[in-house]
Image: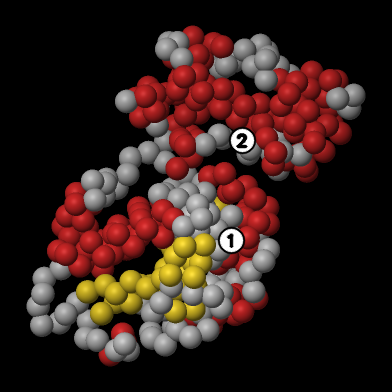
Amino acid sequence: MENAEHKVGIKNIVLLVLPQVQLLDVAGPYDVFTSANLFLPADKTGLKYQVYLISGTSDKVIYSGSGLPLICSHTIYDIDFSVDTLLVAGTELGTLDKINPDLYSYLQNRKGKVRRIGSVCVGAFVLAKAGLLKGKQVTTHWKYADILQRTYPELNVNVNPFFIQDQEIYTSGGVSSGIDLALALLQEDFGKPLASEVAKHLVLHLKRPGVQSQFGNILPEYEQLSPLSKEIRDLLKDKLGQSISIEFMAESVHMSVRNFSRVFLKESGMTPGKFLEKMRLDQAKNMLEYTEMSIDKIAEKCGFGSTVSLRRLFLKYLSVSPAQYRKTCTG
């Protein structure tokens, strides 16, 4: 096969895959870049994308999380062409512990040699462990954002955007967010008109409305909570419409207010008041999605006191109003 770096005008895109990769993490960006070739003019420059699946292991056949095998053209050990853009696709968190350190060395050696390096979903953990995200603003799947922040406190993790650019580093959120990122990279390369054509061809929004955190809970998943946080969550889950004080929480776990506040903040990374606020917001989100209750009634049931407070927090955390959130979720 002809060495791709010798082809005039070719932009080599590498999608780096690992065992248990999510198919859409790969297929979404792959379809965006290859679809762009359908609309790029066949002029003398031959400016096109060439997309490669590259294995992050020594095996060229990688089994996805759904069991479907992906056949890679190269591995990190035999890649023989220059790379314009490298995206690390997501996988299961448990798989990351089994990655050969050679992968991190490979990624570290690409810094300064690749125009753009990015990640899809949990791929951000791979870039972080390779030391490529230090001091960067990044995102990842909403479900794992808190884990990424705790594991790498030097990062600025923002769960809201579908993707984030920080200089030459690009990170995207959960699964389908890789499509949002690929469209943005396409627009960066060839302009908005072409990116819009590709989005229409794939029946996608060029810029998806809303924020990633709309799709998950404001609080971390229950299994990710500390023992004290779980105890407080269980205590409060049926009392959110009531007036709840920190004194009440502390007394319920047989602690002084001062000690409770200190321990809770240390274990959970947030104050008891902020935890309660997020619990109420999660309940309001669920009620907007699964009931026909009025927004006024939901605000009352969740302990916000007024729709003004509910709206303020929705805009703060989700960048949409309660009414807009309900419309997005229910159509």
Q: Quadrant of residue 205?
A: top left
Query: Which residue is rendered at x = 67% and y = 15% of the image?
Result: 238
Crowd class of label 2 (few under 14; some 14 to 19; many from 20; radius 10 Å): some
Q: Quadrant of residue 246?
A: top right
Q: How many numbered marks does the figure carry?
A: 2
Residue 237's disc number? none
Query: Which residue is rendered at x = 63% and y = 62% of the image?
Result: 96
Looking at marks 2 and 1 on the same chain, the residue that comes earlier in the sequence is marked by 1
In the picture, which quadrant includes the N terminus?
bottom left
Query: Which residue is rendered at x = 39% and y = 28% of the image?
Result: 329
Alpha carbon separation for disc pair 2 and 1: 20 Å
Left of 30 or right of it: where is 231? Answer: right
The x, y position of residue 25, in whole percent, is 43, 56
Amino acid found under the numbered disc labelled 1: Phe
Question: Disc 2 designates what residue?
Answer: 219
Against 141, residue 309 (above or below) is above
The x, y position of residue 115, in whole percent, is 38, 76
Q: Mark 2 falls on what kind of element?
A: loop
Amino acid found under the numbered disc labelled 2: Leu
Against 137, residue 219 (above or below) is above
The x, y position of residue 230, in whole percent, is 75, 31
Q: Mark 1 falls on what kind of element?
A: helix
Query: Which residue is rendered at x = 35% and y = 56% of the image?
Result: 28
The x, y position of residue 288, in whole percent, is 45, 20
Left of 4 or right of it: where is 275? Answer: right
- Residue nearest the observer in this picture, 233 or 95: 95
Q: How is the image coloured?
A: secondary structure
Residue 125's disc number? 1
Q: Do we see residue 10 in this rendering?
A: yes
Q: Quadrant of residue 188?
A: bottom left
In the picture, which quadrant includes the C terminus?
top left
